[in-house]
């Protein structure tokens, strides 16, 4: 018996599976790798202090560890790209395979019989024999339209013992050739070899530092590192799902070809014969990255309509598994950084939508291939084999059923899921919010504050005692701040009420010098808020009128500057900075130099960046800075001391407070939204001529809390920032540090 005499298919059975390996290969080189390179560049910028995360965080061990994770994860893309590129050079692979396995022609009768059998299905395939080896047979390319089958000694023995099983082995390899799989699978495949080597190496390289760092402990940063580590650990699995499923389906397709020609029993015997050539357990486990388990292949050896439809839908369904891994990794990371469950749900929905919309081309390709494959199978087969197949067309029903999976995913990608991550969502019904604010008494509170501001202004410009009017204004401004209006007027409104409240407190404390500036700033912002509110009410047709402020922003008379307010030089400022001796447990460090530049409230980001800048805002201003750290998680203490000409220090103080008091919560990032920051005014800390403080919370990949204290004395302004990723010092200790800084400045 020299040949398989199954059905007369003149070239074999039709191909069951679409060429998922080629779909992945082209998509990998054209879309996946370029996109991931861009993502990795962004991550590297983040982890090295050149992105949205403050440099004082990235200077510690946690972010160095994350940088290592990023490099290791990036190697996964390198491996996939290398395997894909290597598949494009079949000539080189063919020569290497024949040298490596000592393959050569053989004129024995048994080889001639095998060659005759192979020639019935693909006469372009030549056999080469290995003098040793524990495999049966493997296809390998020697050109774009040329391939050879390496025959090993166990197959020669099987040919004599069970010829139908040996023919099934050869048919399996022929099917790979006729499907165009030999460029990615088969003997000497660089792609499958790289995957098998890289997976255990990756697990070792990533798991070891994660376990060590978690065991040593690291506070909030340790949690965040673990969360990011979970993402990095799952990333290769996400990337490998599609190619591994495509490799499995290529094997099932080759099994189906062998079953159709030689029968299911022959394939079962061939698979059982392959068990005798198996490698050790560890090697068999890694083989699962390119070959499905033998038991599963045995179960699928008998064709069943339901099983056929399931196999056809497996590759588009792998996208669901890939999405599941993405969701699992993101959920773990969100939990570890302390994000609230409602926000996690919003972000996961946004991520799901982004994933599905990003894979629409892949889904459309899957739909087209599944619906058209019964017709497209013949020209695809002809592309690789010179023997025209006369096999009957595959039945349409399994393909129609399988196409339901990518069609459903494509439909979900157009569903109205949340498209914005937490912090990026905008109010959907501004008019309804404005009406609710008015109904709750918001406009009445503004009118009371405006009236109190008018009375305070009159008291300041007349001989009467302004204390009564100041108390009324302080109460009215505080009440108005508790319920600011929505929309465009909110920032100006908050700034106005904050300035008016500060003016009232300064009047009560007898600090008349800054009071005039604060009142003027408050009235200016109040005018702007009234104008914006009037426009919002007009656009929304809300039944309420916005009266003009009780007083306009007429400049207030102020007292002369205090004695001793001459501008200090940079050297004088430097000599009056905090030192290590003033801060027990702290060590000097370099202040951060990378600042966010993108925000929905750019004035807030610009002001905060300026207060941390290593350079003075203008040539007329002198500056000196100092920075200290108590550890990689903080606290960090940063002092920026500036001296201004004339009365510019008071103006700079007023401008900074005016901006920051109205910031509230805003987004920030380098080129796009990467997190949020919030500024909560805390009021005066009774330092210097005038002072102001705020609690600042930054929510990026690592949450950071901060206390900012601004103090102005004479010609000088001090900005003291105490921040931490693991908990701030007590408020009294922070104020003591600020008091020490002011005491040094005015000595």
Image: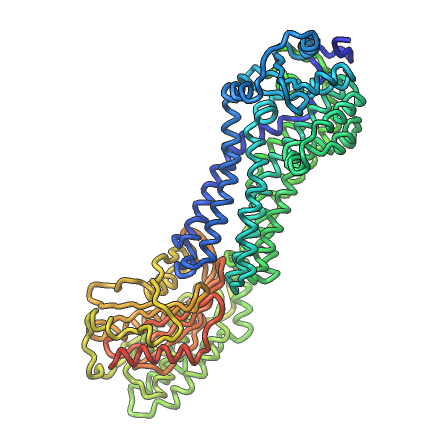
Q: Closest to the observer: 228 or 343?
A: 228
Residue at the extreme front: 132
Task: Give the quadrant of the N terminus.
Answer: top right
Residue, x 58% and y 37% (percent of image)? 360
| Coloring scheme used | rainbow
**Residue 488's x, y, as percent?**
44, 63
Q: Quadrant of residue 322?
A: top right
Between residue 183 and residue 270, name the one nearer to us. Answer: 270
Whether residue 352 is situated above or below residue 509 in the rendered picture: above
The picture quadrant where one finds residue 25 is top right
Is 618 situated left or right of 607 in this image? left
Task: Give residue 167's position: percent from left, percent from top.
Answer: 73, 16
Left or right: 226 as drawn, with respect to 673: right
Image height of 218 relative to 465, above or below = above
Side of 471 relative to 653 (left or right): right
* Total numbered circles: 0
* Above or below, 561 relative to 321: below
Q: Quadrant of residue 405?
A: top right
Q: Position of residue 676 (x, y in %)?
A: 47, 61
Quadrant location, the C terminus: bottom left
Q: Is residue 389 left or right of residue 95?
A: right
Q: Is residue 731 visible?
A: yes
Q: Is residue 407 shown to the viewer in this render?
A: no
Expressed as whole percent of the image width and height from the top left, the position of residue 160 reads 76, 14
409 or 215: nearer the viewer: 215
């Amino acid at each position: 018996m020299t040949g398989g005499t199954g059905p007369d298919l003149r070239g074999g059975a039709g191909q069951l599976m679409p060429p998922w390996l080629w779909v992945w290969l082209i998509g990998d080189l054209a879309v996946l790798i370029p996109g991931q390179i861009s993502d990795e560049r962004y991550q590297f910028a983040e982890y090295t202090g050149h992105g949205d995360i403050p440099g004082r965080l990235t200077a510690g061990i946690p972010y160095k560890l994350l940088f290592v994770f990023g490099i290791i994860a990036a190697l996964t893309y390198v491996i996939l790209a290398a395997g894909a590129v290597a598949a494009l050079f079949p000539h080189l692979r063919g020569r290497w395979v024949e040298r490596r396995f000592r393959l050569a022609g053989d004129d024995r009768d048994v080889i001639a019989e095998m060659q005759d059998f192979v020639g019935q299905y693909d006469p372009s395939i030549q056999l080469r024999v290995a003098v040793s080896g524990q495999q049966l047979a493997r296809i390998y390319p020697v050109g774009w339209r040329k391939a050879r089958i390496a025959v090993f000694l166990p197959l020669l023995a099987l040919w004599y013992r069970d010829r139908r099983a040996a023919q099934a082995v050869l048919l399996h390899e022929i099917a790979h050739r006729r499907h165009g799989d030999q460029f990615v699978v088969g003997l000497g495949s660089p792609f499958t070899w790289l995957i098998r080597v890289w997976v255990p190496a990756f697990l070792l390289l990533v798991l070891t530092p994660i376990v060590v760092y978690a065991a040593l402990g690291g506070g909030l940063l340790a949690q965040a590192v673990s969360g990011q580590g979970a993402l990095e650990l799952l990333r290769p699995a996400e990337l490998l799902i599609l190619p591994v499923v495509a490799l499995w389906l290529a094997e099932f397709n080759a099994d189906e070809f062998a079953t159709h020609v030689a029968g299911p029993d022959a394939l079962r015997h061939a698979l059982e014969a392959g068990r005798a050539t198996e490698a050790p357990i560890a090697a068999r486990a890694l083989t699962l990255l390119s070959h499905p388990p033998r038991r599963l292949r045995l179960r699928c050896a008998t064709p069943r309509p339901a099983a056929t439809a399931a196999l056809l839908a497996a590759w588009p369904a792998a996208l669901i598994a890939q999405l599941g891994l993405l969701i699992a990794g993101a959920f773990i990371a969100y939990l570890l950084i302390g994000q609230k469950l409602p926000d996690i749900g919003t972000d996961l929905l946004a991520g799901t939508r982004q994933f599905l919309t990003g894979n629409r081309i892949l889904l459309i390709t899957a739909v087209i291939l599944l619906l058209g494959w019964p017709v497209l199978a013949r020209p695809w087969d002809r592309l690789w084999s010179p023997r025209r197949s006369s096999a009957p067309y595959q039945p349409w029903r399994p393909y129609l059923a399988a196409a339901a999976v990518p069609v459903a995913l494509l439909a979900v990608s157009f569903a109205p899921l949340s498209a914005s991550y937490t912090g990026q969502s905008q109010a959907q019904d501004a008019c309804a919010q404005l009406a609710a604010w008015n109904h709750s008494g918001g406009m009445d509170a503004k009118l009371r504050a405006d009236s109190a501001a008018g009375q305070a202004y009159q008291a300041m410009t007349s001989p009467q005692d302004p204390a009564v009017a100041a108390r009324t204004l302080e109460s009215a401004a505080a009440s108005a701040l508790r319920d600011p209006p929505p929309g465009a007027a909110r920032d100006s409104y908050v700034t106005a009420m904050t300035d008016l409240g500060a003016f009232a407190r300064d009047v009560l404390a007898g600090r008349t010098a800054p009071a005039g500036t604060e009142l003027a700033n408050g009235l200016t912002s109040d005018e702007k808020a009234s104008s914006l509110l009037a426009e919002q009410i007009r656009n929304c047709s809300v039944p309420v009128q916005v009266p003009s402020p009780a007083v306009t922003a007429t400049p207030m008379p102020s007292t002369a500057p205090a004695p001793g307010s001459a501008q200090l030089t940079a050297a004088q400022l430097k000599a009056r900075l905090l030192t290590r001796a003033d801060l027990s447990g702290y060590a000097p460090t370099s202040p951060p130099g990378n600042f966010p530049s993108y925000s929905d409230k750019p004035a807030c980001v610009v002001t905060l960046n300026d207060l941390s800048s290593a350079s003075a805002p203008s040539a007329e201003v002198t500056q000196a800075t100092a920075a200290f750290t108590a550890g990689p998680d903080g606290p960090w203490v940063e002092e920026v001391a500036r001296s201004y000409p004339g009365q510019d220090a008071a103006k700079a103080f007023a401008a900074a407070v005016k901006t920051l008091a109205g910031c509230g919560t805003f987004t920030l990032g380098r080129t796009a939204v990467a997190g949020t920051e919030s500024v909560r005014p805390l009021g005066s800390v009774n330092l210097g001529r005038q002072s102001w403080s705020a609690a600042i919370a930054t929510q990026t990949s690592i949450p950071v809390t901060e206390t900012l204290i601004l103090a102005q004395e004479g010609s000088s302004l001090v900005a003291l920032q105490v921040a931490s990723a693991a908990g701030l010092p007590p408020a009294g200790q922070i104020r003591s540090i600020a008091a020490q800084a002011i005491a040094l400045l005015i000595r």
